[in-house]
Structure formats: structure tokens, C-alpha cells
Amino acid sequence: MPRTLVTGVIGADTHIVGNRILSMALEDAGYRVVSLGALTPAGDFIKAAVETAADAILVSSLYGQGELDCRGFRDLCVEAGLEDILLYVGGNLVVGKQPWEAVERRFLDMGFDRVFPPGTRVETALTALADDFAARENR
Amino acid sequence: MSVALLIDFGSTWTKLRALDLDSRTLMATAQGPSTVASDINLGLDEALARLGDALGGLPPFAYRLASSSAAGGLRMVTIGLVRELTAEAARQAALGAGAKLCGSFAYRLTAADVREVEARAPDIVLLCGGTDGGNRDAILHNAQALARSAIRCPVVVAGNREVTDEIVAMLSEGRRLVMPTANVLPALDTLDIEPARIAIRDVFMRRIVSAKGIDRASARIDHVLMPTPAAVLEGARILADGVEGREGLGPLVVVDPGGATTDVHSIGAGEPSEPGVIRYGLPEPHAKRTVEGDLGMRHNVAAIVAAVGLDTLAANAGLGIEEAGGALSRVEASVEMLPATDIERQMDGALVRAAVDIAMKRHAGTVETVYTAQGPVQVQRGKDLSAVGWVIGTGGAIVHARDPASILAVACTDTRDPGSLRPRAPRLAVDADYLLYAAGLLAQVDPVAAFDCARNHLRLLDPACAPPASILASARTR
């Protein structure tokens, strides 16, 4: 059975194009994609993941407010019974020139399993998903 | 001459409508008391005798069809997973099937929840949860909880299809009637409540009608087809959408303020009427029914007063506070009361306007401006009814009012509340002969005649006499 992924753009962010392309690529790769689109509150990612029994949530944020929007995301998942769900986040996550390592660290600390910088290729995400799902099966 | 007899077994009255299928007009109406508690035939016979008097003898009927809201109506409990998703889809399906909701549950049922369902003793349980291929644990847990409970009523199962067979097997023990059907929310962006509605109606016809003693009238009628609210919704639907060979009126709203609840039905897609507006939330049903259990002109007067305030209500009625308070206490003392004096009529007018105003505000969608880094964006929740062409009033509180247009006008847009997507410039009409339910029933056997009868008897109101006045908005601006 194909794995289910929830995608969407978090917060008051309307940048939908990249997220659409990512969702289409994930579908082509054989995943079942629940695409929530732009302007999606954090809580809606979690509700959708509960109802569809999703295996991973892929959060996009392009407008620099990602840090505010994503705060407590893992905690919300834990509260909803999704302790173990795979969480990715990617895009223009912060404003200004900040060293990537520090940004990545901050989002990893929030409970995301992987954090992707601007300009990430779809193939990179696909490889990461395959690796992480395989690792979970071997646990 | 071909005549159809349409019967509404109500909680207070047994109402009859005789429709001439050749001229597509109403021939006569009659009513008798509701006698479902003793023998439903007594009230029906009394009503039939009156119909015979009006027609100079009863003609042979080509069809004898009935709807029922007697014996408490169709009482349902709905169960889903996430409150805003499958639990909401389940509520929409049950309301669309004409049910009276006596409980809506989300997530996993607790022991206390199960006891509550047992205590409420519904006629039917609608069990949903999970999109197709999605969550299966919650609905399995809830099915298990129902299977172990004392609940023996029929269960309609409309959840994640992967576990439907398992659930049917689980619930069929204990000799329950279990009706599996398609998922109300097969995917997050797809609402599909029609199969569940059909399944609920099927169970209603097969089981509930006899359980409530309505089938004792089976010698005098052909079928009891559906709960009365479903018949009204069906009548509204054919009027809006048309039938084969007849073009419909287009998107419309029907408001039905009653003694205990206020129903609003809207037919139409409700998509944004302005470009660039983003839709948020669950897809909306094309034929949507909402029931406001706290807005009744007789049983829930206190709730209406609490919502708008006595001073606003009195001002709307054109009365002083003391006169208004006195009229209200007479209503509360006797819920059967019909207005006799001018003051009581004025007060009733204000009450029904307030009920319609609040019910319409809850039914219609909203639009709000969200300020994003890319500038302002309009976000719509619920149905956009601003382009709806018709608002139709039904029920005694509107039909017998002195100025029905003043009641229907409050259902429309108000400049003081621009975020509410109510009808902007609809034509106003009343279902003066209470024919929508009859048309909904007749549509099951002769849709064209049903459409013509409903259309012929719609009484248009002059919009010029309607002041645009939302009571809610005036309460806020005070």
C-alpha cells in the first residue's frame, strides 16, 4: 500500500507554486498525497494527518515567518496521537542572512526530522523519504 | 382527472394536500390532529373526511405518498473522527437526510459517550471516520464500542471503506440492522454525502416507519417515503435545479422558522462569487440543511432574547420594553399560543425576524481579509450565498405574518455585516400553501408535475416593501 503524505504551505503564506510541483512529483513517485495548499494553519496539517492516517507531513514555508508558524508543531502532533509521524520542513524558513546550520538546528530542535534549505531538488526529498521510511521499517 | 394525495404526519397536525396532476395546481388542503401516540389512522381519517368535504367527495388518487416528522422525527446520532472533518461530514449527511440530531461525537467513544448514546436512544446511528485508505483504528474502536453496548438501533456505516466489512460483521452480532454505504469523506477534498442520505432514507422506510407505528396507515397510503425535513429539502432542490424538461430557478434559500427550531436550506454550489477568493475548510454540500435547535418562536424564546437583547427586540417590534416583556411572558407561559392582539403579533414578528436573522447568519458562509506578507487575501469559509436569486419562506410563522417580506428581508445582506455571505439581492417569495414538502414527495414519482406545482404556487412578494434590517447588526451598533 502506498505511503500517505500531507503537504501544504503553513501560516499566512500564499506561495503555492513550489508546493504544487513538489506534490505532483511525490504523486508521480507513487505516494498518496493529501495536498492542503496555501494558507494552511498548523492545526489543519495535523487534523488531515489524523483522518488520512498519514505517514509523513511535509511543511513548506516561503515567506520568512516559518519559525513562528512551526513553533510547537511536533507537540501538536504528539497531542493528536501522531508521536511517530515523520516531519519535514523546507523553503525560505527565516528572514535575512543567517547561517544555514543554525537555522537547521532550530527546526530540528522543534522536532522536525529533516530541514531543507531553499533550492532543494525534488530528488533530494524523495531520497530522504525513501531512506527514512526504510529506517523506520527496520526499527 | 389524475390526483395525487400528499400527507405530512407532523408532531401536531396531519396535513393533506391534493394536487391536480393535469392542471398542476392545488385542489384542496385539509388537516386533522396528529394521533401517532394512539392510532395514526384516527387523525388521518379526520383529515381525509375534511378533504372529502372540500372536494365534494374523495377522488381516486393516482398516488398517496407521505412524509413524517411524528413521534419525535428521525432521531439520529452521528459519529466521526476529527470534529471538523469526518464528524462534520457525518452531521451534514444526517441533516440532509432530514434527521433531528440528538448527539454528534468525534474521535474515540469513551464509556461515558456510549452511555450517552444509549440514554438518547436514537432511531439510527451514522458511523463514520477516516478517509478511504486513511485512519481505521478510530472507527474500528467505535464500532467495537457500539457492538458491546446496549444500542440495538440500525447503524449506517459510511467510513473508511477498508474496514467496512469488518465493522458490518462486528455490528451484525446482536441482530442489529447494519447498512454499509460509501464514505461521506472519501478524500479530504471530496464530500460525498448522497450515498449515506439514501441509506438513511432506506432504513427510515424499512424500519423506522413501522417502529413508530406510522405503518398502521399502510392501507390508506402507498408509501411513507422520507422524514418531512428531507421532503422540504427535496422540494427546494427540484425548484432550484429543475427536472428533466423544466429549467430550475437557480440557487435559492428556504427559511423555515418553527416553534422549536429554525431550519435553513440552501441549494447551490456556494463557490466564491468574486475572483481571487480562497476557499477554506470542508467542501460544502450542494443541498445543505442547517437546524438551529436554540431558535424556536415558542419553545426557545429565552434563547432569542438572550441573543439579541430585549431592548433590540422591543425596538424591532415597535413596542416599549414593558409591553414587549409582557408579550414574551405570555408566549413562555403557553407555547401553543397564537398571537391574538396587535402587541402579540408585533412581538411575534420581531421574534421570527430575529430567529431568521441568526439562523441565516449561521447558515451562510463568511469572508474575511487575512493580511499576509504578500498583501491582503480574502478567505471564504462555508457557502457564498450572495448571488442566490431567491429567498423563500415556508411555515406558519412566515406565511401567516402580516408582512412576510419584512421577515425574509432580514435573511439578506446587511451593509453593517459585510463579512456574512448572505443573499445580496434575491427575489422574495413564500410557499403560501405549504407545498414544498408535497413537491418533494411527488418528485419521487412524477418530477415534472412536482416542479410545476411548486413553481405555480410560489407567491412572489414585492421587494419594495422590505426594509433591509438585520436585527443582529442593529444590536451590535447600538
Image (cartoon, helix red, strand yellow):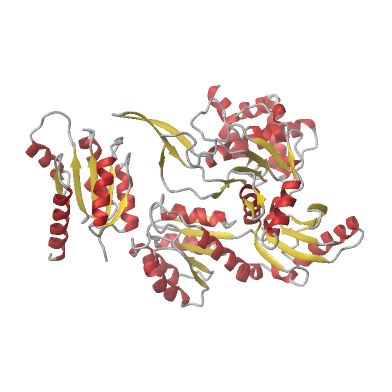
Write the residue at 41% across / 59% down: B186
User: What residue is rendered at 75% in x and 69% in y?
Assistant: B217
Depth order, front residue of B463/B471 = B463
Q: In this picture, is B461 found above or below B174?
A: above
Left or right of B433? Residue A122 is: left
Residue projecting furthest to the right: B56
Q: Is residue B432 above or below residue B86?
A: above
Q: Foreground: B323 or B459? A: B459
Q: In the figure, B347 relative to B105: above or below?
A: above
Q: In the current view of this chain or complex, which residue is farthest to the front? A: B245
Q: Would you identify the image quadrant in which residue B299 lies?
A: top right
* Residue found at x 12% / y 58%: A131
Quadrant containing the N terminus of chain A is bottom left
Residue B139 is at least partly visible in this image = yes
Q: Judge whether B299 appears above or below B401 on screen.
A: below
Position in image of residue B335 (x %, y %):
71, 45
Quadrant housing the C terminus of chain A = bottom left
In the rendering, at what x and y percent does residue B130 appear?
A: 37, 60
